[in-house]
Every structure is written in C-alpha cells, then in structure tokens.
C-alpha cells in the first residue's frame, strides 16, 4: 500500500509539473506582448506628427495622454485583479492594447489620437500591473527567482516591436500595414497562451478602488521611483548629454540608449541565475553601485566613448533592481499583493513621466552634469537600502 501511495504521489507530481511550466511560459509571453505593444508605437510617432501636421510642442502635449492614461489606470488595476481575476484582466487589457495599435497608425485628428493614446495608455498600465502580479505568484509557486527573466522578455518584446515595425516601414509597407502585422502576431500569441494564465491571483476582497501605499510598500515604491527616474533620464536626456556635453555627433546620439537597452536585456535574461547563485541583497547592492559608477564616470571624464561605456554600466546595473523590488512586494504582508504591486507600479511609473521634467529643471538651474550626479547619489542611497528590501 505504501508503495502504491508513493507511486500515486509521483504521478501527481508529474502531472502538476506541466501546468506550472506552462504558466511560467505564458507569463513570459505576456511580458513579451507588453514590450512588443508599447515599442511598436515608437516608430509611428514621426508618421503621426506628419499626418496630423503637428508642431513639436503639440506633439509633446499629445504624447502626455498616453502617460495620463497609464497613471489613471494603474492605481485601480490591482483592485480589478482582486475582483475579476488575473486572467480576465490580462486578456482584456492585452486585447485593448493590440486593437488600439492600428488606430494609432490611422487616426487623422489630434483629438481622436489623443483619446486613443489615453485608452492605449490605460490598457498598457493595467496590463503592466496585472502581469507583474501574475509574475509574483508564478515565482512564489516555483519557489525560485524568476522575476528578472520575466522582465527580460519585456525587453526582448521591446526590441522586437520597434525593430519589426522599423524594418517593415523600411521595406515600403505603410504604417497601418506594418502595425497590423505586429498586432496579428500579438493576438496569436495572446490567444494560444491565455489558457495557461492564472485565473485567481488573489482572493476576492471588498477593497476600495485604491489604497495609498504604506510601510514597506511605500518604501519600495519610492525606490522604484528612483530606478525608473534613472531609466527615464537615459531615455530622454542621454542623447542630449552625449551631443551637448560630450560632443558626440548627432547622428550617433542614439547609441547611448541602444547600448543601455542591450545591456539591460542581457542583464535581465541572466539575472535569475545570478540572483540564485548569490542572493538578492548582494545583487541589489552591486547593481546599484554599478549604475551609480556608470553615471559618475559619465559626468567625470570628458570622452564620448567613456560615456557610452558608462551607459553600458547603467544598463547592467538597472537590469535586475526593479524585478527584485517586485519580488519584495510579493513577500511583504502589510498590504494585499495585488494592491501593493498596483500602488508600487504607479509610484515607479511616475518616475518615468516626471523624470524628464525634473531632470530638465535641475539642468536649467544648474547643469545636466549636476542632474546626472544627483541620480548617481540617489542610486547610492538605493544600494544602502538593499538589506531592508531583501530581508
């Protein structure tokens, strides 16, 4: 009888393994779709400006609607996951993201495009929160570090989306045709992987639409704000730093963010193995020190090639810090996981949106070197807090 029971247990274990592995792969695919969706819009921005006859200022105002939609949706996304279940929220928000892409390539009035960008941003923000909640639960079920790998697939999706649309446009397809091809791929991936998504990520509760983060969740959110602020600074001010401060030719200014992005992708794809080999505290500390060192190098040595190498260090340093924070949010017990992830994501994303303006103010009052130096000091503060985050 004991032998029979052991055999039955072994069979049950084997039967439970495929769904767990399928859920892990489905989570990676959702992160890939999210990166694919947001990056596919980027090559269409110049076409939208030309199609709608926009000035630089009016285009800037229009693009704010995307961020506004995300900020509005993110605080309530955690509640939606708790009420409706993770699978439903991921499917609906993911489908809205995909279906909005052709509209972004075709709408011909500023008002219609602004509304579409707000809906697109809201769906993107909701998907971002829901997939990170899914990732936390899948990681906890696997009982091993997986968050960096999930975020790595977001980076891969970003490279694939921007690259595919740019290649199709270069081959002569219209913006609408190019984005339809990418959208079709995303729909196929979403449909074939939806059955492996977790249905109920957290028990349904009678919670308010949004709870202000408190305790350790607030602390994690502030750290996330600093890290996203750093990413936003490289994205929006890196090229200007290279051209105006380090005299790099304008045609090569995009190299900084490209190097940063590739380094971040490589770092995230290898991050889980690194964290499992060492530990979260060590990786968090070394990563922030690496990013801070990169920024200090960029502002201290007046050679463009040094600044490019510095952006490489910042990319490697920033790769695994945010995933570690999301894992920490999943382990805390002060707030429900869905609400913790929702509020932390909102605070972090505010860093990306507010970052360019904050860097601009500091640069205007002092200098861009001062702004980057301030970011490096903030990263040192994050490194010093690694023990509190990972305990």
Image (cartoon, grey):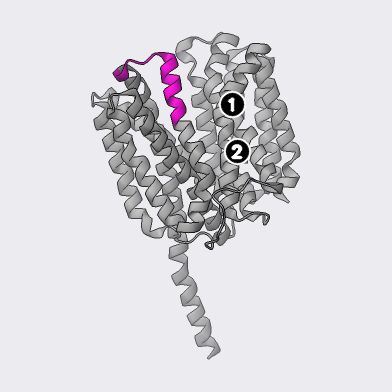
Question: Is 167 placed above or below 213 here?
Answer: above
Mark 1 vs 2, N-terminal side = 2
Of residue 13 and residue 61, the one placed in the foreground of this image is 61
Q: Start and end of the magenta stretch?
A: 51-65
Question: Residue 69, percent across and down?
Answer: 46, 36
For label 2, the crowd category at 10 Å Cα-Cα, with few meaning under 14, some 14 to 19 and many 20 or more, is many
Picture quadrant of residue 162: top left
- Would you say residue 183 is visible in this rendering? yes
**Circle 1 sits on which residue?**
355
Marks counted in the figure total 2
Question: Is 156 placed above or below 134 here?
Answer: above
Of residue 97 and residue 196, the one placed in the foreground of this image is 97
341 left or right of 43? right
Query: What residue appears at the point 51 percent right and 30 percent down from the top-left corner?
Result: 261
317 left or right of 43? right
Question: Residue 371, percent across and down?
Answer: 66, 19
């Amino acid at each position: 009888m004991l032998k029979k029971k052991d055999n039955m247990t072994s069979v049950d274990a084997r039967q439970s393994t495929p769904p767990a592995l399928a859920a892990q792969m489905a989570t990676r695919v959702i992160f890939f779709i999210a990166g694919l969706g947001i990056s596919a819009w980027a090559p269409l921005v110049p076409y939208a400006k030309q199609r709608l006859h926009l000035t630089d200022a009016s285009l800037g105002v229009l693009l704010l609607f995307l961020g506004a939609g995300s900020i509005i949706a993110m605080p309530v996304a955690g509640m939606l996951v708790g009420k409706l279940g993770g699978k439903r929220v991921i499917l609906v928000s993911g489908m809205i993201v995909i279906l909005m892409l052709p509209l972004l390539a075709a709408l011909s009035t500023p008002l219609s495009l602004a509304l579409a960008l707000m809906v697109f941003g809201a769906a993107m923000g909701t998907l971002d929160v829901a997939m990170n909640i899914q990732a936390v639960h899948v990681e906890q079920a696997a009982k091993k570090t997986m968050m960096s790998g999930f975020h790595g697939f977001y980076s891969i999706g970003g490279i694939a989306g921007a690259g595919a649309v740019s290649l199709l446009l270069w081959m002569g397809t219209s913006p609408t045709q190019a984005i339809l091809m990418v959208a079709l791929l995303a729909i196929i991936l979403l449909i074939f992987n939806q059955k492996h998504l977790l249905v109920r990520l957290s028990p349904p509760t009678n919670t308010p639409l949004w709870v202000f983060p408190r305790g350790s969740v607030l602390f994690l959110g502030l750290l996330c704000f600093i890290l996203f602020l750093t990413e936003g600074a490289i994205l929006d001010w890196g090229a200007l730093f290279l051209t105006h401060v380090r005299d790099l030719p304008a045609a090569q200014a995009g190299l900084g963010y490209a190097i940063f992005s590739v380094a971040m992708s490589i770092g995230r794809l290898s991050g889980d193995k690194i964290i499992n080999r060492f530990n979260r505290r060590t990786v968090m500390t070394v990563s922030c020190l690496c990013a801070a060192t990169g920024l200090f190098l960029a502002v201290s040595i007046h050679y463009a090639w040094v600044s490019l190498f510095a952006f490489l260090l910042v990319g490697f340093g920033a790769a695994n810090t945010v995933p570690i924070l999301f894992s920490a949010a999943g382990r805390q017990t002060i707030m429900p996981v869905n609400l913790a992830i929702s509020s932390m994501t909102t605070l972090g994303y505010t860093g990306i949106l507010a970052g360019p303006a904050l860097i601009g103010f500091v640069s205007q009052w002092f200098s861009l070197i001062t702004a980057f130096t301030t970011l490096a000091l903030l990263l040192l503060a994050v490194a010093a807090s690694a023990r509190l985050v990972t305990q």
